[in-house]
Image (cartoon, rainbow, N blue to C red):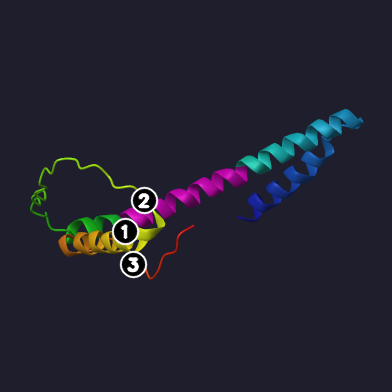
């Protein structure tokens, strides 16, 4: 073990002796060291990412698949085919009627299906 550490230390010292003397050589050597360092950092980050994805798969995805029971297919809701009616003209006089119709439509929708959102309409105003 001691011999390995000494050989690594001497290799580092000998590697420093191989640095070129001119400015362009030093620049190229510095860029090589920088690129190698960046590649090592991204390789380690990729390994960490792979480990995290493996943890997610083994500790989250697989147990949740085992818990889920196959669900019976739901029947599609029956919709009646009503003939298209002509829309009345919108004026300021029947705003209350339009608001009542919209509120009734929303209430009828939520009676048939559970709300998929945690938000609800508290009030509205005309823009």
Spatial separation of the CA atoms under disc 2 and disc 3: 31 Å
Dividing the picture into quarters, in which one does residue 36 lie?
Answer: top right
Instruction: Give the quarter of the figure containing the N terminus.
Output: bottom right
Relative to 45, is 59 above or below? below
Image position of 34 (left or right of 95) = right
Work out whether mark 1 precedes mark 2 in sequence or the reverse, and give the earlier one: 2
Mark 1 to mark 3: distance in Å?
A: 25 Å
Percent across and percent down for residue 110 are: 21, 63
Q: Pointers 2 and 3 in contact (CB under 8 A)?
A: no
The percent position of residue 121, horizontal first and vertical second, equals 36, 67
**Residue hosting label 2:** 90
Residue density around tag 2, few if under 14, some if 14–19, many if 20 or more, within 10 Å: few
Q: Say which mark, if any, is on residue 118.
A: 3
At 17% from the left and 59% from the top, the residue drawn is 68
Is 47 part of what is drawn in magenta? Answer: yes
Q: Secondary structure at mark 3?
A: loop
2 in relation to 24, above or below? below
- The quarter holding residue 13 reads top right
Tell whether label 2 touches label 1 (CB within 8 Å). Answer: yes
Q: Where are the magenta residues, as a range?
A: 40-58
Using the image, tell me which numbered label, if any, was put on residue 98: 1
In the rendered structure, does residue 111 fall within the stretch colored magenta? Answer: no
Q: Nearer the viewer, residue 121 or 51?
A: 121
Q: Position of residue 111 (x, y in %)?
A: 17, 64
How packed is label 1: few (under 14 Cα within 10 Å), some, or many (20 or more)? few
Q: Residue at x 73, y 40 (%)?
A: 34
């Amino acid at each position: 073990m001691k011999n390995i550490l000494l050989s690594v230390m001497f290799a580092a010292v000998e590697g420093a002796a191989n640095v070129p003397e001119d400015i362009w050589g030093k620049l190229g050597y510095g860029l090589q060291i920088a690129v190698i360092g960046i590649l090592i950092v991204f390789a380690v980050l990729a390994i960490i990412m792979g480990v995290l994805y493996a943890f997610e798969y083994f500790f989250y995805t697989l147990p949740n698949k085992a818990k889920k029971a196959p669900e019976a297919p739901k029947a599609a809701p029956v919709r009646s085919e009503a003939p298209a009616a002509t829309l009345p003209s919108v004026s300021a006089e029947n705003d209350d009627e339009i608001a009542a119709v919209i509120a009734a439509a929303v209430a009828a929708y939520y009676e048939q299906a559970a709300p998929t959102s945690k938000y609800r309409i508290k009030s509205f105003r005309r823009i």
